Amino acid sequence: MMNMSMTVRHEWWPQTEEEQLSAGGTVWVARHPELIGVVAQGETEQEAIERFQENAADLESELKASGLPLPTPTRLSFELVVESTHMDSGGKVSAQPETRFQAEPVALA
């Protein structure tokens, strides 16, 4: 017997750019034109993207809790997570390693 669960989640995929600081150095900035006011910075592009996605998730939670509509994204990134357990004929249960499938961001028509 095998049990399997799958989770599909979406993330807003921001635009990023490296900006010069007036005091010298640079910082990566991530923003999305459909999420006005949601901006994140990081020392690396990946850090800025991760912070942006956290901020976007917080905004979505706040909008849902307030009963307000979510913006409709035009670009999404998907990750499919598959978790499974297996029970052999002797009743022994073993967990299978989590399998992740990640798709590149796609534009929605």
Image: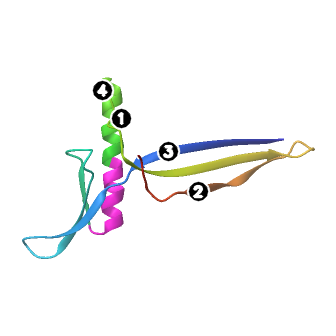
**Which residue has dot 2 on it?**
101
**Which residue has dot 4 on it?**
68
Q: Are marks 2 and 3 in contact (CB under 8 Å)?
A: no
Residue 19 quadrant: bottom left
Q: Amino acid at mark 2?
A: Phe
**Which residue has dot 3 on it?**
9
Of the residues tagged 3 and 1, which is closer to the observer? 3
Between marks 3 and 1, how big is the CA–CA gap? 14 Å
Residue placed farthest to the right in the image? 90
State the residue in front, 59 or 12. Answer: 12
10 Å crowding of disc 1: few (<14), some (14-19), many (20+): few
10 Å crowding of disc 4: few (<14), some (14-19), many (20+): few
Seen at 33% across and 41% down, the residue is 58
Q: Which secondary structure lies at badge 3? A: strand
Residue 59 as seen in the image, left or right of residue 88? left
Q: Which secondary structure lies at badge 4? A: loop
Magenta segment range? 43-54
Residue 8: x percent and y percent?
A: 54, 44
Instruction: State which tag comes first along the sequence, 3 or 1.
Output: 3
